[in-house]
Amino acid sequence: MIVIHYTEIDNFKKSLERFYSPLLLTDRADISGAGVVNVSAHFMIDTDGTIHQLMPIDYMARHIIGLNYSAIGIENVGGGNNKQNLTVEQLISNIKLINYLKKSLVLSNIL
């Protein structure tokens, strides 16, 4: 399973900083009931379409409660204030990354 998210922050560096702490930040009361571990994702796509791999795909990321063991997470920078939702470059990169992951995971018998 591949799950696509957005960071709600219109800046790559600031979005990435949200993942640095190993413990969940105090402003995430909406998911604090699921534990104290901070959120994470396998990939982050910047507004210019640059794909950054944040962790190996065979590591479990915490990005979707209840499905973390079986899901690969992709975060897209932006989307929080309707100023800059998914850019055309991000859309293209999401399509390329998902197609690559589907092909790679099937070939490696992970799926």
Image (tube, helix red, strand yellow):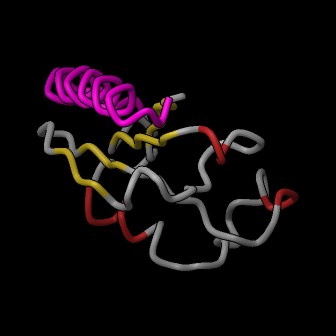
Image location of residue 31, percent across then percent down: 77, 53
**Lateral position of residue 21 relative to residue 50, left or right:** right
- Seen from the viewer's position, the closer of residues 59 and 36 is 59
Q: Residue at x 44, y 47 (%)?
A: 7
Q: Is residue 93 magenta?
A: yes
Q: Which residues are magenta?
A: 82-111
| 37 within the magenta span | no
> Residue 40 appears at what percent x and percent y?
52, 59
Q: Quadrant of the N terminus?
A: top right
Quadrant in the rendering for residue 83: top left
Q: Is residue 49 above or below residue 12?
A: above
The image quadrant of residue 55 is bottom left
Please report the residue visible at 19 percent of the width from the left and 24 percent of the height from the top.
96
Query: Residue 61, located in which quarter of the rendered image?
Result: bottom right
Looking at the image, is 74 positioned above or below residue 32? above
Q: Is residue 109 left or right of residue 11?
A: right
Q: Name the one closer to the observer, 37 or 61.
A: 61
Q: Residue at x 26, y 43 (%)?
A: 45
Residue drawn 32% across the image and 29% down it? 107
View extreme (right): residue: 33
- Secondary structure mostly taken by the magenta-highlighted segment of the chain: helix
Question: Considering only vertical position in the picture, is 74 above or below 42?
Answer: above
Count all numbered tags in the image, as a single digit: 0
